[in-house]
Amino acid sequence: MSSLDTLVESLRRLPGVGAKSASRMAFHLLQHDREGAQLLARALQAAAQQIRHCERCNTFTESPLCSLCADPRRDAGKLCVVETPADQAALERTGAFRGYYFVLMGKLSPLDGIGPREIGMHQLMARALDGQVSEVILATNFTAEGEATAHVIGEVLRARGLTVTRLARGVPAGSELEYVDLGTIAHALVDRR
Amino acid sequence: MSSLDTLVESLRRLPGVGAKSASRMAFHLLQHDREGAQLLARALQAAAQQIRHCERCNTFTESPLCSLCADPRRDAGKLCVVETPADQAALERTGAFRGYYFVLMGKLSPLDGIGPREIGMHQLMARALDGQVSEVILATNFTAEGEATAHVIGEVLRARGLTVTRLARGVPAGSELEYVDLGTIAHALVDRR
Ligand SMILES: [Zn+2]
Ligand SMILES: [Zn+2]
């Protein structure tokens, strides 16, 4: 296989990139942006080597603790559970939450073989039962899978005696947090139930 | 900047990839496909180092001559001018053309600063005037820029005494060859004017 074919095949592994898009990307990089190709190559290698998961919240980080978990000024009594770093970022942008997070890095999806183990349920339980957390706020997406994930996590944590709340349904059903406007998220946070 | 931010920024240099797509790609690679990230990094480096331009037709190749230009069984009297390797591949799939190609690797676009020099006009003239080529078939896209490119190239080559033809307008106006069905392209090739 030529190195051009190999490049096109490798680009197709990116989510949402089909054969035509991959060819166009390869053409663009080779014809107009070889510097970009080199930068991307180095960025991929650096990221794959350096990025690990935060020991406390499970998000991506290059240190044992991410910068948010390492910040002692947050409210240790509140733990907010989100699906992805992008969802966490959306909540942070509202400025309405001052506690800590746990990032599932996914959602329950039995048909794809993603069960409690894959979303770090064991790690989440240890984190929520640290003795300081008094309330766990479930901020998974308001999709079918996000709701199911919230339900399962809520059952487990309530059985351990924790107070578990859910973002209010001010967030439009069927939507993903990442794409919801800040005001809606902030309001849903205040009205959590 | 963290290596995650660097990766997202680098992915945004790909055509058609915005901030959200880049974040999703980075998340996917780091969470689900680190092998894919490594493969893509190596493919980018290999391609950027090894891929050059064919000395005769200007397309991408890892040798001085591409495999098509190195094939002595083609009809040396006919030279087909296309915009991109993808357009050349579309023509080859029809099986209706047995001559050689010249690949502009772009099209005239004065507003973007892409003039005759950038599309290899000098190299094309040397190629077309090799003494063997008797007909140059212009197969640039049937877009405004592709038509303008065909017009300019046609003027220059006819002034040098070459026979210049254009794919018949069986190709729907406004469309790009890469996306046209084989039969239409084959018919347009037979009806070239
Ligand atoms: Zn953390
Ligand atoms: Zn060639």
Image (spheres, coloured by chain):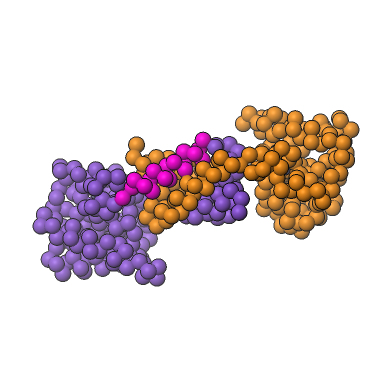
Chain colours: A orange, B purple
Image coordinates for residue B18, horizontal then vertical, percent? 55, 55
Tell me: residue B107, above or below residue B40. Answer: below
Image coordinates for residue A42, horizontal then vertical, percent? 49, 47
Quarter of image, ligand 1: top right
Q: Quadrant of residue A145?
A: top right
Does the segment drawn in magenta span residue B41? Answer: yes
- What residue do we see at 46% from left, 54% from top? A36
Task: Give the residues in magenta.
Answer: B35-52
Does the segment drawn in magenta span residue A175? Answer: no
Residue A167 vs residue B170: left or right?
right
Tell me: residue B74, above or below residue B127. Answer: above
Residue furthest left in the image: B131
Quadrant where the image shows the C terminus of chain B: bottom left
Residue B48 vs residue A161: left or right?
left
Q: Is residue B181 visible?
A: no
Image coordinates for residue B161, horizontal then vertical, percent? 12, 66
* Numbered-mark total: 0
Quadrant where the image shows the N terminus of chain B: bottom right
Residue A35 vs residue B116: left or right?
right
Tell me: residue B102, above or below residue B98. Answer: below
- What residue do we see at 38% from left, 52% from top? A30
Image coordinates for residue A66, horizontal then vertical, percent? 70, 45
- What residue do we see at 67% from left, 31% from top? A118
Q: Secondary structure of the magenta portion, mostly?
A: helix
- What residue do we see at 60% from left, 48% from top? B4
